[in-house]
Amino acid sequence: MLGAIEAGGTKFVCAVSDEDLTIVEKITIPTTTPAETFAEVFKFFDRFELQGIGIGSFGPIDVNPQSKTYGYITSTPKRLWRDTDFVGAFEERYQVPVGWNTDVNAAALGEVTLGAAKDKASCVYITVGTGVGGGAVINGETLTGYGHPEMGHIHLPRHEKDTYEGFCDYHGDCLEGLAAGPAIEARYGTKAEELPADHEAWEIEAHYLAHAAMSYTMTLSPDCIIFGGGVMQQPHLIHLLREKFVEILNNYVDLPPIEEYLIATGLEDESGILGSLLLAKQALN
């Protein structure tokens, strides 16, 4: 059996599957303290004979195998989780190979293997929710180096109507600070899903996401960019995003048709957990 954890800032999704990635059982656990959360995860996995575990985690995390803190959650805004040895805890308990990457890299792996980017060599996956994160698969491999992508923390040109200062603890008005769900709520005093489709919030949101997509296109040249997360559940947003992207790209590079390039998830909310199962399979093999 393969075990997988999609470790998010508000919840952990844990699943067990067979080698064909058919999920046998799945649970959701609130993210509290490392000790409390791990205890609940152990309680779930202890019922199965695991051959490998894949973990897609919120970050920043240490993905450098040569580092002394490989497998740790590092400078996360979730202060209780800073300097947590995530991989070590699961290697010690289960004595099996552990695949380790960011939650968004795991989601990108899920989408390029099984979802909207299936049969493509590359994709970028962007989640827009309580934060903004991005992962990538390039030439079949998840994108990591000394560290890992932090695509939500790039700086972008300001929308002319936007005076909001941004909420990111580290960078203020980076992409996450301006375009995540809490930024929309802070500007208008209500949650994104409660705003009408013709509200100016969506024009501003599309502006930031389109400029971000432009940066990822110019830097990584992926086969497609996939958007997921709670904020992207508004069906009009992807259309506004495409319109703005085409405008600012100004035909500079050749791309697939826009409806095939900026796309929604194919696996919906399963991208991360299926990608984490793929990490487990990779570690085992």
Image (cartoon, rainbow, N blue to C red):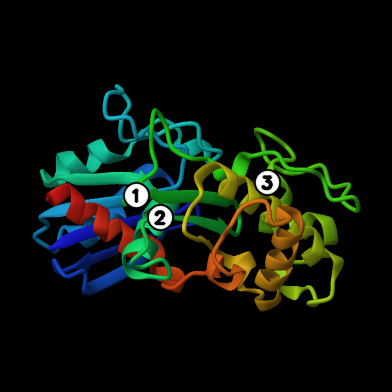
Asked if residue 36 shows in the view, the reply is: no
- Dot 1: what SS? loop
Which amino acid, by three-letter code, is at mark 2?
Ser
Residue 212 drawn at (x, y percent):
65, 49
Position of 251 relative to 149 (above/below)? below
Tell me the element at label 2.
loop
Total labels: the figure holds: 3
Please give left or right for residue 199 compared with residue 83 in the image: right
Alpha carbon separation for disc pair 3 and 1:
26 Å
Give the Cα separation between the discs numbered 2 and 1.
Answer: 6 Å
User: Is mark 2 in CB contact (under 8 Å) with mark 1?
Assistant: yes
Please give the residue where the numbered disc 1 appears in the rendered image: 139
Q: Nearer the viewer, residue 26 or 197?
A: 197
Q: Nearer the viewer, residue 245 or 171?
A: 245
Q: Tag 3's secondary structure? A: helix
Which residue is tagged 2? 122
Q: Picture coordinates of residue 251 (x, y %)?
A: 69, 57
Mark 3, residue position: 175
Q: Quadrant of residue 275?
A: bottom left
Please state, as top left, top right, bottom left or bottom right, where the N terminus lies in the image.
bottom left
Q: Nearer the viewer, residue 142 or 228?
A: 142
Q: Is residue 189 left or right of residue 146?
A: right
Labels 2 and 3: the sequence-earlier one: 2
| Distance between mark 2 and mark 3 Cα atoms | 23 Å
Disc 2 to disc 3: CB gap under 8 Å: no
Q: Which mark is first along the chain, 1 or 3?
A: 1
Mark 1: amino acid: Asn
Residue type, label 3: Leu
> Image point 78% across, 43% down: which residue?
157
**Residue 229: % across, % down:** 55, 64
**Residue positioned 65% across, 33% down in the render:** 170
